[in-house]
Amino acid sequence: MKGMITMNEPQVWTLIGVFGATMIGLLTFVTQSFNRTISAKFDAVASEFKSVGSRCDAMESRFDLIDARFDVMDARFDVVDSRFDEVDRRFGRLEKQVNNLEDDVRAISKKGVS
């Protein structure tokens, strides 16, 4: 076999070296691209979480405002409730006076009849 190149010739080893260097370079390029893509995606996810956190903070401040409004309403209802208690006491006294008045009218009418 006269025209074949054997493994001990420099051209073969040069081609093997070029192929190996190309494969290592390609692997390095793919790895770097993958790392950059993953880093960019993680940065995007982190920024989304930050925006969600800021939205949650805004909602929390709104809920604090609503809680303050409810506290004001509770105070107003407490005032109204105390007024209703006072009205209830007055009606209780009025009811006693009406009952006493009814007893007085009965007593007067018995005296007038006898």
Image: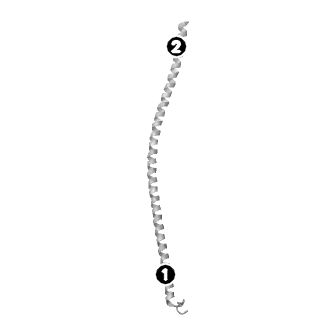
- Which residue is drawn at the image coordinates 48% and 33% (left, top)? 82
Mark 2 and mark 1: Cα distance apart in space = 122 Å
Q: Which residue is mark 2?
A: 105
Ranked by sequence position, the earlier of labels 2 and 1 is 1
Q: Are marks 2 and 1 in contact (CB under 8 Å)?
A: no
The image quadrant of residue 72 is top left
Comparing labels 2 and 1, the label whose residue is closer to the camera: 1
| Residue 114 located left or right of residue 33 | right
Nearer to me, 34 or 60: 34
Residue 111 screen position, x and y as percent = 54, 9
Say few, some or many: other residues with alpha carbon within 10 Å of mark 2 (under 14 / 14 to 19 / 20 or more).
few
Badge 1: how crowded within 10 Å, few (<14), some, or many (20+)? few
Q: Mark 1 belongs to which amino acid?
A: Ala
Q: Nearer the viewer, residue 51 or 57?
A: 51
Q: Which mark is residue 53?
A: none
Quadrant containing the C terminus in the rendered view: top right
**Color style of the picture:** one colour
- Amino acid residing under circle 2: Val
Q: Residue at x 45, y 39 (%)?
A: 73
Tag 1's secondary structure?
Answer: helix
Q: Quadrant of the N terminus?
A: bottom right
Q: Is residue 52 above or below residue 25?
A: above
Asked if residue 24 is positioned above or below residue 108 in the image, the reply reads below
Rendering coords of residue 67 (x, y %): 46, 45
Q: Position of residue 57 (x, y in %)?
A: 45, 53
Residue at 46 percent of width and 35 percent of height? 79
Q: Determine the secondary structure under disc 2.
A: helix
Q: Which residue is mark 1?
A: 21
Q: Please, is residue 73 above or below residue 56 in the view? A: above
Above or below residue 108? Residue 81 is below
